[in-house]
Amino acid sequence: MKRFVLGAPVVLLALATGCDANLRTPDTGVPPADTGVPEDIVAPDASEPADTGAADGTSPDTGTVDTGTADTGTADTGGTDASVDVPTDTRTPPTDGGCTISPPAPMQPVSAALLPERRVTCGCRARTPSVTPGSDATRFLLRGRIVTPAVVHAAGEVLVVGNLINCVGPTGMCASRPEASNATIIETGGLIYPGLIDGHNHVAYNWLPEWVAGRLFMNRYQWQRATAYDTYITPYRVNVGMHECAMAKYGEARAIFAGTTTIQGGPNRTCTRVLARNPEFGADFGGVDRHATNILGISTVDTMAAANLRRQMDDGSLTTYIIHLGEGIDDMSRAEFTDLLTKNLLTQATVMVHGTAFLDSQHMQAGAARSRIVWSPRSNVALYGDTTDVRSALMRGVLVSLAPDWTPSGAPDILQELRFARNVGRNRWPGLLTDRKLVEMVTSDAARVLDRHTLIGSLEAGRYADLMVIPDTGCDPYSSLVDAVAADVELVMVGGRPMYGTSSIMRALPAAALTGCEDTTVCSSTRVACVARPGASDMMNQTLEQITTELRSFYPMVLPLVPRCP
């Protein structure tokens, strides 16, 4: 499906007039077919294999059933030249309702530069959401186009009861249940997705603006020792002891503003239990904790520690060992994989963060062990000028998720990371990373990478009621999320609790559903964020305004929660 970008005046009209998404296509209960033509660029060369739109079949899916066919492995490698020129699309744009729609933007060469924030439409004006309050503040019936993501319901609904999803299906299926009685009905007019999952970040750093090093590095130890980095990171280092709670909560608020409901890499502090879920800690997952992290690297693991880790992996008490590994592009970084093997720690529990240096032979070993990788392309390209060979990893059976890493070198949020990853894929591995695959990398695949797939990562009955809503302008449901901008996120729920959204939705909800909420401004529009827990202890009662003021007391240049506007 072709997609087009609205100019600013048209956007205002589109958001105001509305479009009935429920009348577009009948609900078949299966994902729509992908045409095979990458969005926003001219048609691929005839020699390039067509994209079937099927989900990548390189790893077993223990969550929802995917009806797509297995990847045949015929994707073009695309070469290694990241600076190739792409022809500009000169087609005449169509019009819709008298409004001129801009032509698609061409693919961009791979560089560390973030892609522009652009609102995209396919000729359908987004509907204005409406809310019918119910008497039970713990029950919500949301309607819209639903992406589970394995199944798309063109006209569907999600019933939330307490902190869980009770029902997902075509319109009418959930409303007829007795549990829907007295629920607040939210006609989103938009697209409803699972809450996004950030599989790796350094959350407490995410108030810092980007660090521009002015050079590239061979491995992470080089830039960590650089004088310029030491100067840049000093405000964090000297203040984290007193202000870690505010730092981490601000980082989690940034994630939620972009639709992320689970984020790895935060401190294990009670003060952060009010925002996004932290998958490495049991407190947010019913007390179940079979995770361990190592951000310092494999060199810090001695023989005794390695033996203990392996014993836990073998007996099932450790199912997810998240470790920074192979972050760089030199032999030193690559040798970390050998060190992992030597210490007998390459197993199905191993989650390798970055793996930028890995060769195909190492991906083959990782795939045979059923280990996993978290990919952060923007941070990789900014620091090393290159990124993980995702094509090799996927073809060798390694499960891969996508994550921004942190604001110093990664994208400010997961939505921008999605667009960056798409652009890298189009340049280097044409046909491999479909928009559907990218969506899976931040939902269902990310949940499996973190071994939390029975509770998060998909919209299914019995899962946590973590979800996000964006406007629906008629585009492919997977492409719509990859193109989404943080400024347009309309609603975010974590565990059935409305955490963030537009003022028109949030202020229409029952008062009992909104605790610790405050108005905030995002790209000149009013949003409502529910950050505080009134009456709670251990700084859980801080408002977003108080958190921001605390950070600015020692660092006036705090990065805005949504720093880039369309």
Image: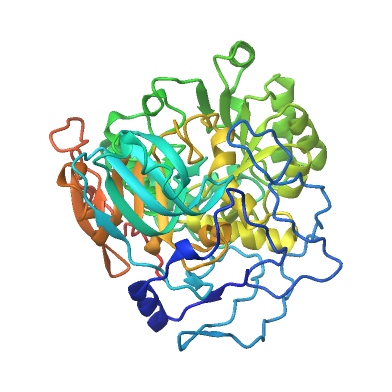
Report how many numbered discs are placed on residues in the image.
Answer: 0
Q: Is residue 476 visible?
A: yes
The image position of residue 208, as x and y in percent, is: 38, 53
Pick the residue in front: 141 or 527. 141
In which quadrant is the C terminus drawn? bottom left
- Residue, far right: 47
x 18%, y 47%: residue: 510
Q: Would you place residue 338 above or below residue 39 in this image?
A: above
Image position of 90 (left or right of 360)? left
Q: Quadrant of the N terminus?
A: bottom right
Side (left or right) of 88 relative to 7 = right
How far from the left and from the top, in percent, is residue 358?
Answer: 74, 41
Residue 347 is situated, as x and y percent measured from the top left of the image, at: 68, 23
Q: Quadrant of residue 396?
A: top right
Query: Coloring scheme of the render?
Result: rainbow
Where, by quadrant of the figure, is residue 539 drawn?
top left
**Res. 552 in view:** no
Quadrant in the picture for residue 535: top left
From this view, report whether residue 144 is shown above or below residue 516.
below
**Closer to the camera, 334 or 441?**
441
Residue at point 67% right, 49% down?
A: 218
Q: Is residue 331 above or below residue 549?
A: above
Residue under the image location 39 percent in, 38 percent down: 465
Residue 21 or residue 415, whichever sits in front: 21
Residue 228, image x, y percentages: 48, 54
Residue found 52% across the figure and 40% down from its top: 199
Relative to 423, does residue 122 appear above or below in the rendering?
below
